[in-house]
């Protein structure tokens, strides 16, 4: 039986999910602005126990890759990579804006996530999980202007962890590497191929 673990620590919330056999999902969600590093593995132990499984039963891992909290992303990615290496199983990295699009109820949607400094992380989707173009960091006013007519706008920073688990179960690990997309400069060297373009504000 396949058993996927999904991890999201990109927002101020610890989210874990176990997807067994492609349908049954057990989740653990705790609001947590800080302390995710200390809580993640005890929480995972609780979730595994509740589901009646152990670490060696895991067959793949999915983790959000950002944008999001720099510290939170490091925590989730480090845990996912470490477990994948120890267990010898694939680890799938799912971009956070794509993961957020999974809650859209219709077809066309736009994820517009407050990035502070009067800016937004922005990306459009033809349907949940199917991106149009690449994500960008835009002035907030520019992001709002770019929302397609009739598109559902997703503004919550919190991923539906069960939806993420179901989405990731069939993804090709080679196409979704567990590598961070921080977007903004941080105290670590960015991986250029995952840097999201900053788009200047245009005149009205």
Image: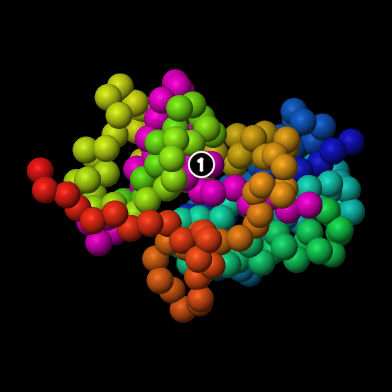
From the top left corner, tell me how far across and down residue 35 is, in percent: 55, 68
Which residue lies at the image location 83% right of the left edge and 48% below the top edge?
58
From the top left corner, tell me how far across and down residue 164 is, in percent: 61, 39
From the top left corner, tell me how far across and down residue 9 is, in percent: 56, 57
Q: Quadrant of the N terminus?
A: top right
| Classed neighbour count for the residue bearing mark 1: other residues with Cα under 10 Å, few (<14), some (14–19), many (≥20) | many
Residue found at the far bottom of this picture:
187
In this rendering, is residue 74 above or below 30? below
Position of residue 21 in the picture relative to residue 106 (left or right)? right
Residue found at the far left of this picture:
204
Colouring scheme applied when the structure was drawn? rainbow
Q: Secondary structure at mark 1?
A: helix
Specify start and end residues of the magenta stretch as a single range.
90-119
In this rendering, is residue 78 above or below 198? below
In this rendering, is residue 10 above or below 147? below
| Residue 21 appears in the figure | yes
Instruction: Identify the residue under disc 1.
Output: 98
Which residue lies at the image location 24% right of the left edge and 40% below the top edge?
144
Q: Is residue 95 magenta?
A: yes
Nearest to the observer: residue 46 or residue 165: 165
Q: Is residue 191 magenta?
A: no
Which residue lies at the image location 43% right of the left edge and 40% below the top edge?
133
Label count reads 1
Q: Quadrant of the C terminus?
A: top left
| Residue 36 appears in the figure | no
Which residue lies at the image location 84% right of the left edge and 64% below the top edge?
86
From the top left corner, tell me how far across and down residue 49 is, in percent: 81, 49
Nearest to the observer: residue 199 or residue 145: 199
């Amino acid at each position: 039986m396949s058993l996927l673990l999904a991890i999201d620590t990109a927002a101020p919330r610890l989210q874990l999910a176990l997807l067994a056999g492609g349908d049954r999902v057990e989740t653990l969600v705790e609001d947590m602005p800080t302390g995710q590093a200390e809580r993640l593995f005890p929480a995972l132990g609780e979730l595994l126990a509740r589901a009646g499984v152990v670490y060696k039963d895991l067959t793949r891992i999915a983790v959000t890759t950002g944008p999001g909290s720099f510290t939170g992303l490091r925590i989730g990615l480090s845990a996912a990579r470490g477990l994948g290496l120890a267990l010898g199983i694939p680890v799938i990295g799912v971009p956070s804006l794509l993961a957020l699009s999974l809650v859209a109820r219709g077809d066309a949607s736009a994820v517009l996530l407050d990035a502070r400094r009067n800016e937004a992380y922005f990306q459009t989707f033809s349907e949940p999980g199917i991106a149009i173009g690449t994500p960008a960091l835009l002035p907030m006013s520019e992001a709002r202007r770019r929302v397609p007519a009739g598109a559902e706008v997703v503004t919550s920073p919190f991923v539906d962890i069960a939806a993420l688990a179901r989405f990731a179960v069939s993804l090709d690990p080679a196409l979704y590497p567990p590598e961070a997309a921080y977007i903004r400069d941080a105290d670590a060297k960015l991986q250029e191929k995952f840097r999201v373009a900053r788009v200047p504000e245009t005149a009205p």
